[in-house]
Each structure stands twice: as structure tokens, then as C-alpha cells.
Image: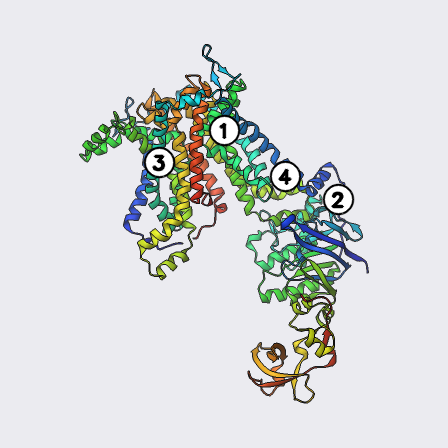
Amino acid sequence: MRSDPNKAGWGLKAATWAGVLFLHIPLALIILYAFSAEDKSYVFPPPGLTTQWFAAAWARDDVWAAIGLSFRVALIATGIAMVLGTLAAAGLARTRFFGRDAVSLLLILPIALPGIITGIALRTAYHTMEIPFSFWTIVIGHATFCVVVVYNNAVARLRRTSPSLIEASMDLGADTFQTIRYVILPQLGSALLAGGLLAFALSFDEVIVTTFTAGQQTTLPIWMLQELIRPRQRPVTNVVAVVVIALTFIPILAAYYLTRSDEQPSSR
Amino acid sequence: MNTMTLPAPAASGGGPLRRLSDLLYTRRGLALGLLLVPPLLWFGVVYLGSLFALLANSFFGLDEFSGVVDRSQLTLANFREMLQPANVDVVLRTVAMAVAVTVACTAIAFPIAFYMARYARGSQKALLYIAVMLPLWSSYLVRLYAWKLLLAKEGAISWVLAELHLSWVLEALLATPGIGGNSLSFSRLGTFIVFVYMWLPFMILPIQAAIERIPGSLLEASSDLGAKGSTTFWKVIFPLAMPGIAAGSIFTFSLTLGDYIIPQVIGDSTLFIGQVVYRQQGVAGNIPFAAAFSLVPIVVIGVYLWIAKKLGAFDAL
Amino acid sequence: MTVAVTLEAVSCVFGSGAQTVRAVEHVDLTIEGGEFFTLLGPSGSGKTTCLRMIGGFTLPTSGRILIGGQDVSQLPPYARPVNTVFQDYALFPHMNIRDNVAYGLMVKGVDKAQRLRRADDMLELVRLGGVGDRRPAQLSGGQRQRVALARALINEPQVLLLDEPLGALDLKLREQMQTELKALQRKLGITFLFITHDQHEALSMSDRIGVFNNGRLEQVGTPPAIYNTPATRFVADFVGAANVFQGERARQLAGVDSVMLRPERIHLGGQDRARLSGPVLDVQYFGAFSRLRMDWAGEPVVVDLNPLQLAALPDAGDTVHLHWSEDAVHALQGTAA
């Protein structure tokens, strides 16, 4: 249902764009602050502009260590999530069996329930089984809630793929494995990539579950959280924040363009 | 037709891979099982297992002398502890905040969603969609940090209000008990504003999807039958958008209920559910109590989901 | 002539309990090598399920399927010597046309140069030489259909299955493709198994037709046999327009319980020795013929008239007298549909 944009009341338009501004001004502000010359407070407007903090941030070892850990965790967690998510999608996309809805609910649960529940549940499990905190305790948590992201993308693409393509491939002599290799995977390709990118971004940014499963380790979000509670060098934090914005924009936009045609057809 | 020597099509019984392929084809159940076993195994063991551990631990207690979790007997001590007035306060405070945030998000999101669904076209629509999506997917902490900057005593908001000679409004708000505090960045009002900001995209998108699903012919029929614009809105559009609102409210409600970072960074020193759980499992080492307390948001969300389902939220997801 | 496909007591049942669907019920069918055989019937009649069972996409729940004498009942599609042209063509969108056509050869391990050359030859055969480098999305529906045909035929199947391939084409294109397909089949000599719900298509293209209804095969025969001597009321009604009479009226006309009379076999004449007389209900103009309905004591009788052979068409209410030759009336077996 579409109406002429010019007929929308000015009040509605104003409310819409005000809302959009509300969403984006804070982000714009951070970018401004990364160049602020003031380093002791968050004063506005900034007394002067400088790029010195970028160099200062570059020199900070703890920042690099945190980025490194987040990156490694995200990489492995995304890998696991892609395997599990694709298998689940292949199993659930076009089948009907008893308990099917329960299974899709189970996959969504880690993201549907608040992070604190997933976090405390994992924490309790590790404690009960006397598993010490490690790289893997973080990865396990991340992989679990990243599965659904890959799953959603894969299922959307599989549902859009005509089943007769698989039948045609088999009809022409390709067995199950050849069909997977020559027809199914190429069809899924960009959806899986998009799912992987989103999963990566999600894992890279996740903080709540991570704080429960990381023990003493510091991922980048945990580093930022510590800075938020006890600011040490504010400008460096600003710079890191800007870098994070830039780093996460790219996979999100890429994922969006890869799967644009998979969305529900909206009335254009 | 001139023939070319083709390798004979492999009848069943070519190499082992081919035989496996045949087996998977004729035994659909086996193929399905192979696909689903790894994810189900993972989720069963890791996720359901953890949830079970959580539930179990809520019935354990701490040994009084050693402070270690005593797993030899079950107890309801944690639940009795939760009924203490201080803890009940925490729950009520958190639920009240969740409700307030949900209402505010709905009010702000609705015009945006409505415009996006009904009026935006082509590139404008894509632009709006990206504009709403990007904050959703960009870093939670960065966005929180941005608000820390904005709300600071010396920050942008104070500056703008000072320029507009409206500082007295801010002072009055901050002096109000219950929502005020030392400064915006350490007050319940500030917490509220940040919550609304964080979850706003979660509310916009389902409402937009729900409104978009309304067939144009319904609106035409409504005006054809003589209804004015506002009547059509309240009698046709709003009820049909309800599932979208309900779906979005699931996010805002449950996210607010479980969040402990925003109240800690922006809030005054009163505690929310998430903070209690976090502190108990960390500093206090009282995992059983943390586990028991975390059952509260699960139950509250369960009830809320049940209500939302009645309102048709799941059709809109 | 060798036998290409045999179905022995084949059934296909989906679901269970209250939701059982008996898609195909105990079908026996023999298709000769080299013939153009059509499975005809309305949607849900089981013809598509039969085709899918022969192709291997659905497995029969009982009975045997033999292709070229070999029992293939439980074999997957890639192990059967048949190829299929799908209703939606099912061209692989991520490959160009040439690779699509060469796909069957590729999975069998034929080397690249040879299979690509062969693919180009096949495209020439279906009169699409030159589109090899394009993608399916860039072709029209009719072109895609030819590609699907080439892709299937390149594998030299014993039987070619065509699942309502012309359904998506507009009328002119469809008629053109009908002629081409028939010519292609004659030229190649491969057994074609064709599915359609369009009786005109079936009559004009087939060597033999199998008519399906509710999962059962009601009649198998040549087009003239199906048209002039339908076995059951369903077949009579489905293939062409028919006047079907039961019980008392049937006995009055031919002394049997159920008869069929084709509208074009009836002509108007004088009152003298007329078989039936009555008032005209209405007359519809169809260009090549006009269709008149006469009221026979409550039941309409349909008569197809060539307008050029009459001085003037009757009007509603006029009395007309119907004549037909003895052999125009055909007795039907089987219960009322």
C-alpha cells in the first residue's frame, strides 16, 4: 500500500526525520569527539580539533590485544555457526516433521531470551562442571547465539530456491553430493556469506554473554565497558569507538546488499 | 542421431559415495537425521544443558562456612530470599522501566514506521531502511558510549539547553525524586532515554512490516464506505498494526528486563534485575542465588510472550 | 517395437490416517518405445505423480516401474535412463546456457572441450545457436523451454519426460511449440512421455493417450479411440464436449444405460424422422461453429452447427428437430463420474 509521499502530513514527515536524526546524531557525535582536543572530560563543544589521539590509540597495546581476542573469537564462532546454521537450515527449510517448530524455536532462543539469561546459564554450567574460563568458553557462547543469524539467511535463500533445481540436477545424473556441490552451494553462496558477516559483526560486538563467560579475558567490548565505567584515557576510547563504527558498518552494508532480493516482496 | 560414446550412467552401485547418495535418497529420514543431529546435539548439550544447570542451581545453596556451593541437597532458601522487600523492589523497578520504555518506543516508532510503510518509495525507502538498520547492528557499547558523552554534565545536551535558556527544565527534572539524580548521565531519566534509543529500531521494523502488509484495498474500501482519514486510521490501520507493535514490544520489554549494563553505566545506584544477577554470580560468588533471581525475568517474559501471542505478535515476526 | 516403460500395479499414497492422499491408485500402463504418449487429466488426477514416479522424484508405495525392461522402482533419478523437461524449466540461474546444457555430461565426467561442443550442437538442434553465453534470466519463456529440452536430450535418454512444458506459453507460441515438439520426437525417435491437462494438445500431438481421473487410469488409446469411443463418462466429458445421457433417456436413445453423443454429430433437419425435437434454449457463436442448446424435457442437448450450412440460425424459443446417424451414439461403461 503506497500513497503519494507528498500527501503525507508535514507533522508525520517531521516526526519521521526527527526520529531518524535521533538515531544517528549520537553516532555523529562520537566521530566529532574523536578529534576533540580535550582529554579530561566530555565537554561540548570541543575546545579544539586534533588527530593526535589516533596515534595514541595506535600505540596502546591493550587495545590491540582486545581487538585480537575479539577477532579470533568472532572468526571461530562464525565458522562453527555457519556449519551448524547451514545444516539446520537444510534440514528445516522444506521439511515437515513432528517437532519441527520446536526445533526452530530452540535455535532462536539464545537470541530471543535476554543475553543475561544465556550468560548466567552458561556461567552456571561452567561452574557446575568446573570448567575454567578460557578462549573456548567465550567461543561456545558466541557460536550458540550466532547460529540463528546464519540459519535465518540460509533458510530465506533455500525457500526462495525452486526445488525443481535439485530435481533437475539429479535428473541429469548428479547424485546427492554432486548436486550439493554444483547447484545447492552456489545458490546458497551469497546468503551464507551474508549470514557469516552478520554473525561476525554480532560476535565482535557482543558484551553481555561475554562478560559472563570470559573470566579475566578482555575482548574489545569488555575493554570498552571497562572504559565506560572507569574512564582512563577518554580520547583513546573515542577513537576506538570510531574505529568500531567503521568496522561494523562494512559487513552490515555488505550483508544487506548480498541478500536484498531475499526479503519479503514488499509492495513497491 | 549420431551418437558419441557416453560413459554408461552409473546404475546404483558405483563407488561408496554413490551408494551413500542412493541411501540418503531413498531413506529421507536418515538424510534429515544427518543434517539435524549436529545442530541439535550442540543446542541440546550446550544450551539446554546450561538452562538445566541454571534451573538446578537455583535450588542449591551456599555452604555457610566455606562459601562453596552445596550440591548435596535442594533448598528453597534462594526463593525465600527473593521475596525480601529489597529484591521485590528491584523486580518492580525493572518491570516498570520495561513498560515505560515499551510505551515510549511505540510512540516514537509509530510515525516513522507509518511513514516508511505508507509513503516512502524507491531510494527514499531504501535510505530509511538502512538508516534504521545501521544503528540496530552497530555496536551496542559504542551507542551507549555516545550517550555517555551526550548526557555528561558538560556534554552536548547541557550545552544545547543552556543556549536555549532551558537549563532550569533540566534542573527541575533532575531534582524530581524517582527519576532524577546528580546529572543526566547518572539518573533514572538518563537510563530511560538511553533504553528508548537503543531499542527503537527493534520497534520500528516490526511495525513497518505489519503496516506494509495491510492491503491497500482495505483502505480504499474504508474510504469508499465513507470513513474520514482519522477514522480509517483508528479503526483499520491501528488494529492491523497491533501485531507489529506486540512483536516490537517483545524485544523492548525483554531487552530492558535483562539489561544490566545501561543501568550500571548511566543509572543512579539503585539496582535492576540484571545488576543483581551479575553481582551475585561475580563478586558475591553466590551462583545459586543469581540463578534463582534470573528465573524472574524468564517468568516475566514468559507471561509477556503469552499476552503478546494473544495479541497476534507471532504472526508479525 | 520394444517396450519403453511399464508400470505394474503402481500406487502412490501420501500421508496417513485421516490425511491419506491416494495420489495414484493401482495403475497398469505400458508405453511402447518411440511413441509420443500423453498423460491427460485434470489437476490432482495423478498424472503428474505418475510422471514423477517414472522420473524417480517420487517413489511408489507399491508396484513396480520398469524402464527398458529394468526394474527402477526404488532407484534415484540420477540412476535412471530418463530425463525430464520441468514445468518451470528449472534452468540453473548461476550458470550460462551452454553450461546448463552441458551439465549432464559434466557430472558424468566428459571432458570440457567435448561437452561444450556437444552442447552447442544441441542448441543448434533446438534452433537456439548463439545464446550459449547468456544467462537464463536473459531469455524469454519460449527460449528457456528449448534450453530445457536441449539440456535433457543431450544425455540421450531412453525416455523423455515432459511435465506440462507448454503451460506457461501464450497461445500462438504454444501451438508453434506443439508442432516443433512433435517433429523433434519423430526425428529423434525417442519415447516422449508428455503431461498436459489440455485435451486439444493431447489429441493433436499424441500417438496414444492415457486419461487419468482421481488417481486411476480410466482409458488408454489412440486419440480417435479416446475421442470417438470413450470408455467412461469422465473421459467422454473431459475430451471434447459431450452429451451424456443416463438411465431412462439413454435406454430411449440406444437401449443401454449410459450413452454419449458428440454435439458435432448432430444436425438440424425436418420434423420427419427426427430423433429428438424441442425448443431452443440459446445459441452461442464461436466463429468456426455455433453451439445450440435444445431443451429435451428438462435436460439440455448440445448441438454444434456450421453456420455456413444453414440459411439462418434458429432463435431461442424456436422448435428444432435433431438428426444423427446410428453410429454417432456410443455406449459408455463404468459408473457415472
Same-subunit check for callouts 3 and 1: no
Secondary structure category for the residue under label 3: helix
- Label 1 Cα crowd, 10 Å radius (few <14 / some 14-19 / many 20+): many
- Chain letter belonging to callout 3: B
Q: Quadrant of residue A247?
A: top left
Residue C157 visible to an observer of this rendering: no
**Where's residue C80, x and y in %?**
73, 49
Q: Mark 2 near mark 1, Cβ–Cβ under 8 Å?
A: no
Which label sits in the foreground, 3 or 1?
A: 3
Disc number placed over residue A212 in the picture, else none: none
**Where's residue B44, x and y in %?**
57, 30
The residue wearing badge 3 is: B99
Image colouring:
rainbow
Same-subunit check for callouts 2 and 3: yes
Residue at 43% over, 36% down: B303
* Comes first in the chain, label 2 or label 3: 2
The residue wearing badge 2 is: B10
Residue C286 visible to an observer of this rendering: yes
Which amino acid is tagged 3? Val
User: Which part of the image, by quadrant, shows the N terminus of chain C?
Assistant: bottom right
Q: Is residue B102 above or below residue C238?
A: above
Which amino acid is tagged 1? Ala
The residue wearing badge 4 is: B32
